[in-house]
Image (tube, rainbow, N blue to C red):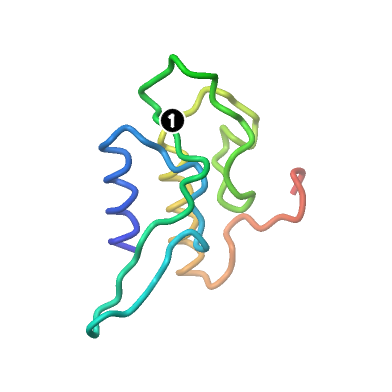
């Protein structure tokens, strides 16, 4: 989990938010006896300091890892949505099941 958090922190330090943090977007490999974790799928990544572009999309992130502001369709959010998703993943690792599973938007 340390390396996952470090990767996201590096993105945030450079003013980018991933907006789709989920276990499937972490690539794990083993090289020379050491495990490597890489963050992938930057299709929804966005610079959050640069507000001159189009407004933020409210429908981002996978349902189980979506922050409350995204569930409420807010277009005013920050990189904290990535931190929420990391917390959901950490909980999932501890509990052995999803923290907020759902099959639809209402769930």
The answer to which of 35 and 53 lies nearer the viewer is: 53
The N terminus lies in which quarter of the figure? bottom left
Q: Residue furthest top?
A: 52
Give the residue displayed 32% in from the left and 38% down from the top: 12
Q: Is residue 106 left or right of residue 57?
A: right
Percent x, y of residue 7: 31, 53
User: Relative to 3, does residue 17 appear above or below in the rendering?
Assistant: above
Left or right: 18, with 98 as reference point: left
Label 1 CA crowd tier, 10 Å (few <14, some 14–19, many 20+): some
Which element type, helix, strand or loop, lies under badge 1?
loop
Q: How many marks?
A: 1
Quadrant hosting residue 67: top right
Q: Which residue is mark 1?
A: 78
Instruction: Return the x and y of residue 39 as percentages of the image width and height.
Output: 39, 57
Q: Is residue 78 left or right of residue 15?
A: right
Q: Residue at x 36, y 23 (%)?
A: 49
Residue 24: x and y in percent read 52, 63
75 over 40 or under it: above or below: above
Q: Quadrant of residue 102?
A: bottom right
Give the image location of residue 86, x and y in percent: 43, 53
Q: Is residue 31 above or below residue 99?
A: below
């Amino acid at each position: 989990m340390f390396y996952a958090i470090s990767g996201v922190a590096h993105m945030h330090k450079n003013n980018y938010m991933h907006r789709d943090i989920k276990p499937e977007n972490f690539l794990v490999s083993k090289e020379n006896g050491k495990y490597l974790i890489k963050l992938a799928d930057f299709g929804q990544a966005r610079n959050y300091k640069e507000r001159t572009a189009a407004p933020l999309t409210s429908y981002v992130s996978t349902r189980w890892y979506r922050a409350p502001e995204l569930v409420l369709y807010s277009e005013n959010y920050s990189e904290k949505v990535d931190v929420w998703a990391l917390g959901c993943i950490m909980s999932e690792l501890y509990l052995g099941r999803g923290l907020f599973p759902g099959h639809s938007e209402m769930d």
